[in-house]
Each structure stands twice: as structure tokens, then as C-alpha cells.
Image (tube, helix red, strand yellow):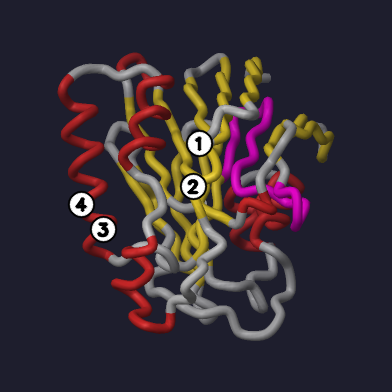
Amino acid sequence: MCTVSFIPLADERFIFTSNRDENPNRAATALHELEVEGKTLFFPQDAQAKGSWFVFSNTNQFVCVLNGAFEPHLPEGSYRLSRGKMAVQFFEYADHRDFINTFEFEGMEPFTFIIYDQGTLIELRWDEKELHEKMLSTSAFHLWSSATLYPTSWQKTRFKLLKNWTEQKERTQAEVMDFQRSEFPFERSALEAIYGDRVPDDVPVETLSVSSIHGNKNAFEFQYKRKDASVQLEKSVQIK
């Protein structure tokens, strides 16, 4: 949910990787499988909210959700639907355009939603008032960080660090996952840079895991690793 990268490779391949910074009580322990509208979905399930931050399917689609849109915010009251459940519900729609035109965003907490839909990469940001849509190039490097956890300066620094590292040579999926786990862990100082003395002494957040897809035209190779390596999940999915 917190630091996410898209790294293009040769021959229309890519590596998409997500660090999850969250309360340890919400750590995933298994890869769930679900049939929705003729699609087979796979996702590590949030142990508490029962949704997911990262969902992929056999129809050459995946989504990833991050907390916050453009600016940090503090949650206020209750919201219509958890963002993790929205990630699963995305696959009930025919495609990203149907989702954008039909889904009820009103009442949702601010989020950044990355959608890969059969070769099209889209960034959606909901700021509680307006949905901001941005089409992205799949031949360019991209990096996102949760607006609620990382100030803009941290996001820019991480972008440069990962981009410089990947440009040295083509990296493997395992290398990217190890790099993001070791170089981009959650740090309390990032919160202090945003919220100052409002940050509690005991923040129940840490980098729980790294999830990644190595994709091409024919398959998704998914890997999930808990930070302490206590849980490792793998799934190879052939594209329909």
C-alpha cells in the first residue's frame, strides 16, 4: 500500500512491485482465489479488512491501491467501503473504463489506484471531491508512495534512487523485491516530517511484505514475501 514501482523491461515485459506498510495485525498469510464475472482473481488478503491492496487476474489485469491521493490526510469518521474491497470489486466491471464511469467513488477515503488493464496503465487519484485520471506509458519508469506516510521529498528521493539502480542493468524480480525491502522500509521520521508532534510514540505500522508481478504477454509471475520471510507465496498465471 505504500511504495509501488513499475519497471519496464525489454520485449514488453515489466516488473511491478509493492511494499506494504501497515499494522502487523493486518498481515496476509495466504493467497486467495476468487471467481468473479468469468475471471479468476488472486490476492493476498488483508487479515483484518478482508480486502487486498494487490489483486491480479488471468485476464491480463491487476490493480494496486495506496492510501491517500495528493496530500496527507487524517481519517474522519466512517467511509462507505474499504479501499481494499474496492480493489476486489474492480474486477466486477468489464474494464477500467466501465469501472471509472460506473463505480460510486463518493464516500470513499482518499486513495491512489494503479490499474493495469490488458496493456494499459492508469493512475486514479480520489481526493474525496474529484476523481483524477492519468494514462501512463508502459515503456516508462513509475514510482508511487502513500501520501499519508511519505512527504513529497521522500517520494522524489526514492524515485531517483530506484531509477538510477534499475538503469545500471536489467534487474530480476527477486532483485527488485530485495532492493525495495531493504532500501524503502517504513520510517517513523517520514511521518514526523508530515505530521510533526501529532505522531504517536508507538506507531503500529511497519513494512510487512513485498509483493511483485513479473509480467509479459502470456503470463504473470507473482511473488509475495513477508519481511521476516515467515510467509512466501508464489503463483504463475497464464493469461486467457
- Tell me the element at label 3: helix
User: Is label 4 in a helix, a strand or a loop?
Assistant: helix
Q: Amino acid at mark 2?
A: Thr
| Magenta stretch holds residue 80 | no
Determine crowd level at label 3: few under 14, some 14-19, many 20+ residues with C-alpha closer than 10 A: some
Point out the tag, 2 or 4, that comes first from the N-terminus.
4
| Residue 164: quarter of image | top left
What residue is pinned by disc 2?
207
Give, as a single range, the part of the protein colored magenta. 46-63
Q: Earlier in the sequence, mark 4 or mark 1?
A: 4
Residue type at numbered disc 3: Trp
Q: Nearer the viewer, mark 2 or mark 3?
A: 2
Q: CA distance from mark 2 to mark 3?
A: 16 Å
Residue plotted at (50% across, 30% down): 212
Badge 2 marks a residue whose secondary structure is strand
Q: Is residue 232 visible?
A: yes
Kindly indicate the quadrant of the structure image that contains residue 83.
bottom right
Picture coordinates of residue 22, whole percent (x, y)? 56, 55
Q: Amino acid at mark 1?
A: Val
Q: Which residue is under mark 1? A: 210
Tag 1 secondary structure: strand
Q: What amino acid does circle 4 point to?
A: Thr
Q: Are marks 1 and 2 in contact (CB under 8 Å)?
A: yes
57 inside magenta stretch? yes
Specify the label residue 154 is tagged with.
3
Q: Work out whether residue 227 or residue 70 is closer to the camera in this orientation and state it.
A: 227
Q: Are marks 2 and 3 in contact (CB under 8 Å)?
A: no
